[in-house]
Amino acid sequence: MPTITINGVACEFTPGQTVLQVATANGIDIPHYCYHEGLSIVASCRICLAEVWAPNPRNDNALEPIPKLLPTCQIQAQDGQHVYTDSPRATANQKAVMEYLLVNHPLDCPVCDQAGECKLQDYSYEHGRGVSRFEETKVKQPKKDVGPNVLLYSDRCIMCTRCVRFTREVTGTNELIVQGRGNKEQIDLFPGKALDNPLASNVIDLCPVGALLDKDFLFKKRVWDLTSSPSVDGITSSGDNLWIDHADGRVYRVRPRTNLEVNLWWITDEVRYGWKHVHSEDRLATPKRRQHGARVETEWPRAIAEAVRGVRRAVDEGRRLAVLLSPMLTSEEAFLLAETARAFDPDAILGLGPVPTVGEDRAFPPSRDGEPVHQSPRSPSPGQPPRPFIMRAEKCPNARGVRRVIEGIGATPLDVVGFVTAIKDHGVGAVILTGNYPSAWSTPDLRGALAREGLFVVLADTLDSPLVELTDVVLPAATWVEKAGTFENAEGRLQSFEAAIRPVAGARAEGQIALDLHAELEQERAKADGAGGSPAGVTPKPARLYDAAATRRRMAEASDALRVFITHTHQPPAQHLRQTDMPVVEV
Amino acid sequence: MFTPKLTEPVLTKRIPTYPFGDEADRRIVSYDDYVKTGGYGALRAALAMPPEDVVNAVKESGLRGRGGAGFPTGLKWTFLPKADDPDEPGVRYLAVNADESEPGTFKDRLLLDYDPHLMLEGIAIACYACRLSVAYVYIRGEYHHQARVVENAIKEAYEHGVFGAKGLLDGADTATGKPWAVECHLHRGAGAYICGEETALLESIEGKRGWPRNKPPFPAIEGLFGKPTIINNVETLAHVPSIVEHGADWFKTMGCESSLGGPPSYGSKLMGVSGHVNRPGVYECDLGIPLRVLVEDHSKGMRNGKKFKSAIVGGASTGVIGPDDFDAPMDFDIGRRCNVLGLGTACPTIFDEDTDMVAVARNLARFYKHESCGQCTPCREGSGWMLQLLERIEAGDGRTKDLDLTLEIATSMGAMPGTTICGLADGNNWAVRTILNKFRGEFEARVKPTYVPVTVAVGAAANG
């Protein structure tokens, strides 16, 4: 394998890799602004320049210096080269570039959202001079409203043009351009356009400085107060890998987590802002029960007890239990709910909740006649063809996973129409519904069927909706950021994730609700058995806590078909689960 | 004493110019006039030669690019990838650099103004020799009149079958047995200096923002629209017909050998003198002509009888020579001999003894600041910073440390080899640095010294 020596470290590489890529793969940090692995290479920021010594074949392969400093982001690694980014010439250039970049930068870090995750700050600290010798007048640039979600502070821009290349090469929409020349040039909108496309907000993450900012996150939180938890898209079937940035039990923003097998470096705006319902004012926070036809707030134990009592009564009367498993649920929760349903009624009807779709899948860069309109020259790894980013039409994360679970335990999932037909039948006496959609989801048909006299309805949902008025017990459920589990995306990839925040006040994960119902049921049954024998033998048995990993193990034991949840589930890389990058100091 | 070897005009054969003719007789050379005076004969001769022989003739002549860098033209032509079938090499381009925007440079303008067919004949020969099928003449945006002249000439050339689908010279038979067809287009710039940089020029022709490209890939491999491309200056191409007609040895009788052991500077050169002289203008001279002869003979001496102080050698980017270098020969060695970037376009701008060199430096810095394309950080930010420093120094508000800072910025921006994609920052560096180094006294007279305060401990502090 060819070898290149970077800062004295011998690194093996695949031909075609650039020096910067080899360095990054080997843990050597080379500063860079304009280079991004998902975009074309322009080599214009000039901070990654390195001193290169190459073997000269005309001189018995003796190492000879190349007179010019070369951009490591652009030059391909060659066997036998020695590259120095820590030589006096290279560091002098890094210092000079840092000083130049700050010449017209307003240095308004205290009021800048990017502070704390800003490459200007990082590289100033690592490679900069500390003091600026610039005493002249700075060029002042305007602040611009470029799109529905993005603000542009031209002042802070360092003209790396990542955002411009993104709209050209990834979205193919070309909204952003470079306008002007020299130190007066700025990023601007193409006349008559706005930065409004399904991937637009990715430019915020792309921007290495505080020039492109998120209107939604603007002035909300200092980033060093945020904790980042790895997660997976819980809004669409894309399975996009995410960072959930949160503090004090509150989500502040969602960012893409690079995964070259799924979402590359991007997420769609609907996923990025799709967490808004988590902290919606309409969130159901307190369990409710029916009292004289009205719904009153109650405590969890009572709500669970009433739910169990109602379902048991129906089943005892010889009527069926029907459970609607939402495609918003994690696979583990679907399994626990199905298991609980069968504990109530071994012949329980299992249905798959409505699977919302909007339009069709869209690929980025868009293609015309089968050819990409704007070919992004970057592929995830050398030798592989570039793959598109796909925005999914299916707006639920786990339709495949829930179906897989239901089929895995030997049942046939009914679709919504079938489910509604089934519960219209008087043979069904109790219904447990799960929702968890980011907006109202019930159909008039479903509501009509639920309104039937004598039907006991339990609803586990997140948002207040007309459905609540039709139920006997309402159990507030938790969204995906508040719980752990596994989603199966549109490509059949199983991805597990952990909870980012604790459930908002009063809510419980559906998995926990299933376990609570199950525990209550067993206790009731034990009591009933005990009523005929010795009541003293019944001690209250607390419900197990919902544990996604343990549930996956139980699923594998329960059915061979569900073993895939052990064998094929992708978990976030270990380094993503680390909560801090601060070194541990022995005191 | 300098004796010119150039006894009759080569490039200015049809453009009366001192000492060979009277400027008053100049007029636009039409196709008919051009052919009557032997025009397109060289093209006919070239078509009778195998293409490789034409390339070899240019290579042997030692013709060096007249655009500024002085790169051997024949060698550049050999960088094109070898085609499997020489008759079907695929689309390959010739880009003609007529974006003459270097401050003080106006030599190509003479050809474009009066004798555009000379360039077109050079284009046709180059396309035949290098198997190029499409030529783009990229003309500077401010050259309105010249663009009209060239456009008209191209039209004439098409009408008379020089260009077009039938093949060169109405589908004339060539040594390869097949006619060679060339399309020629005129492309007007929009007034950006940077578009004279060869790769920015390609971007501009492609309809993109004129931002220089990273090299490699070099244009000869991957140029215009991703295809192999040769980029030549107008004057370079204008030399090609006479080389084909008279041979490489004839070309070597003009110009001079290198006195420093480097590659020779053969042939004649258009030199445009401007500044404080009595008769500014473009003159065709031997390479190697002393600047003093150019000024005192061709340009009728310094204006108002003043003394020579300094000169920009060949376009602002090359930097200036000092008063002692008045006798410097204008050849491609001038860079090493006089500590400037190089010969450049060989269009000197002459300064007399009254010139304020600080103002010259500031003026040039303003030009580079205005024309920096803004792609690379050092040039974008450094050029603006340098201008502000020089403005402050000129106004008398500078300090001695500002002089050092100016030099440091110049050096870290571009020092040939510089740190940027293209050479604009290098040009900025050479212009400002050579002025500051060669006329440091004038700058020091303008700035206040930077005092380093010395603290003397007295009293209790001194006793500890």
Image (cartoon, coloured by chain):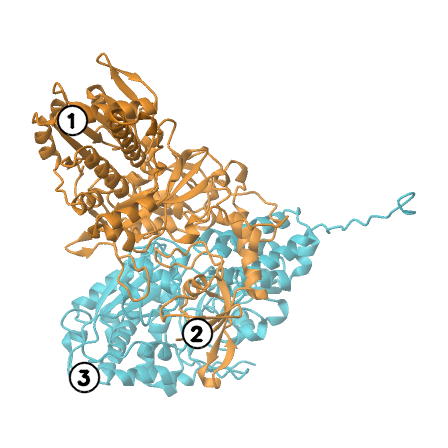
Chain colours: A orange, B cyan
Q: Nearer the viewer, mark 3 or mark 2?
A: 2
Check the residue under mark 1 and report the chain it is in.
Answer: A
Residue B69 figure quarter:
bottom left
Q: Work out how far the residue at label 1 is from the one at label 2, CA to CA, in angstroms.
A: 74 Å
Element on which disc 1 rests = helix
CB of mark 3 within 8 Å of CB of mark 1? no
Q: Left or right? Give the position of B408 relative to B78.
A: right
Q: Which residue is mark 2?
A: A3
Q: Left or right? Give the position of A9 relative to A550.
A: right
Is residue A269 shown above or below B220?
Answer: above
Kind of residue at badge 1? Asp
Residue B169 figure quarter:
bottom left
Kind of residue at badge 2? Thr
Q: Work out how far the residue at label 3 is from the one at label 2, CA to CA, in angstroms.
A: 47 Å
Q: Pick the residue in front: B253 or A566.
A: A566
Does residue A554 appear in the picture of this structure? yes
Does residue A169 appear in the picture of this structure? no
On the image, the x and y values in percent for residue A260 come to 32, 55
Q: Which residue is mark 1?
A: A316
Kind of residue at badge 3? Thr
Residue at the bottom extreme, as displayed: B249
Q: Pick the residue in front: A529 or B411.
A: A529
